[in-house]
Amino acid sequence: MVVRFIKSGSKRPKYVPNRLPEISYNDNPVLDRFVFICGLHRSGTTLLERILAAKYDVSYLRASVPESEGQHMQSVYSAAMHFGGPGRFAFSTEMRAELDALLSDPEGCRARIIADWSRFVVGNSKTLLEKSPPNLTKINWLRQIFPDCRIVIVTRDPRAVSAATHKWADLSLAELMRHWDAAYTQAMSDYKAEDCVLVRYEDLCRCPEDEISRVADFLQLTTRNDPEQIEERHKALVNSNEKYFVMHGEANYGPGIWNRLGYDI
């Protein structure tokens, strides 16, 4: 996949989304229901999105941007990379201010985002499945822009996530752990049982059929008559946490939102 960048302003690079030649797109999508998958980078959000898109009757986004994340296919709000990227964006007051300003015209904001996404829609379902890690810190904002949307919050042991993203950020593991805590603290403060469902990467790997069915039932999705092919890299669900745990040595990070989410570290 070739990804090009343009300069947005004086210092912010931006991905340029293009259609993928091997994909059949819907040139006239009609979208009226939205499902947002969120979770920090390397938490299993792409894995879950690919499985749901293959097994259930949903539309989804595909373009020449990292993991076909919707944040890179629209021009309304800035992508997380503009606010420091992995390990930093959850701390950004600038990001929060930008989102708050957009609430002055939620209907117009929604219309512009949908118009941008429409060029990259695959499928004929009126339900759009969208995945972007920074959705994690904008759950309440998404509710206001997309009324009646549903949110899937994916978690993974913070030690694995911080170690897996360490190569992308000039930050210590301890700093990345604090970012995990901040991001999921924000998500859980916005959590509502009526429109949010939690999925642990560890449970998804251990009982994939049960977890996928549970999520699909909550989202009220219909099984495809002819399931689509899943990319080879997502066919085997293997919990790879252990290889990341050793990077932390004997570090003790104390209490955090991870305790509430079932991680005893």
Image (cartoon, rainbow, N blue to C red):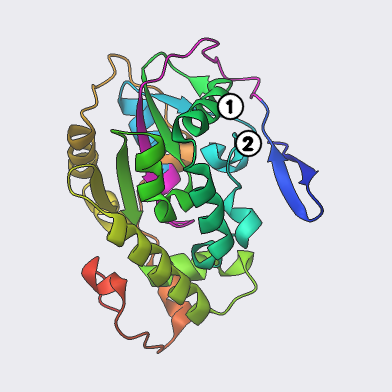
Q: Are marks 2 and 1 in contact (CB under 8 Å)?
A: yes
Decide which of 44, 145 is in the foreground and name it: 145
Residue positioned 58% across, 20% down in the render: 119
Quick one: label 2 or label 1, which is nearer the N terminus?
Answer: 2
Q: In the figure, is residue 130 to the left or right of 5?
A: left
The quarter of the displayed image where residue 210 is located: top left
How far apart are the alpha carbons under marks 2 and 1? 7 Å
**Disc 2 residue type (three-letter):** Ser
Residue labelled with disc 2: 75
- Provide the residue span drawn in magenta: 19-46
Q: Quadrant of residue 83?
A: bottom right
Disc number at residue 49?
none
Which residue occupies 45% across, 35% down? 106
Give residue 252's position: percent from left, percent from top: 36, 88
74 and 55: which is toward the camera: 74
Residue 24 in magenta stretch: yes
Measuring 45% from the left and 81% from the top, which residue is drawn there? 248
| Vertical comparison of 256 with 223: above or below | below
- What x and y, as percent, mark residue 157? 35, 67
Q: Where the N terminus falls, by quadrant?
A: top right
Of helix, strand and loop, which one carries label 2?
A: loop
Residue 129 lies, with reference to residue 89, above or below; the image says above
Q: Tell me the SS state at disc 1.
A: helix
- Chief SS of the magenta region: loop
Give above or below for 46 relative to 35: below
Q: Which residue is mark 1?
A: 116
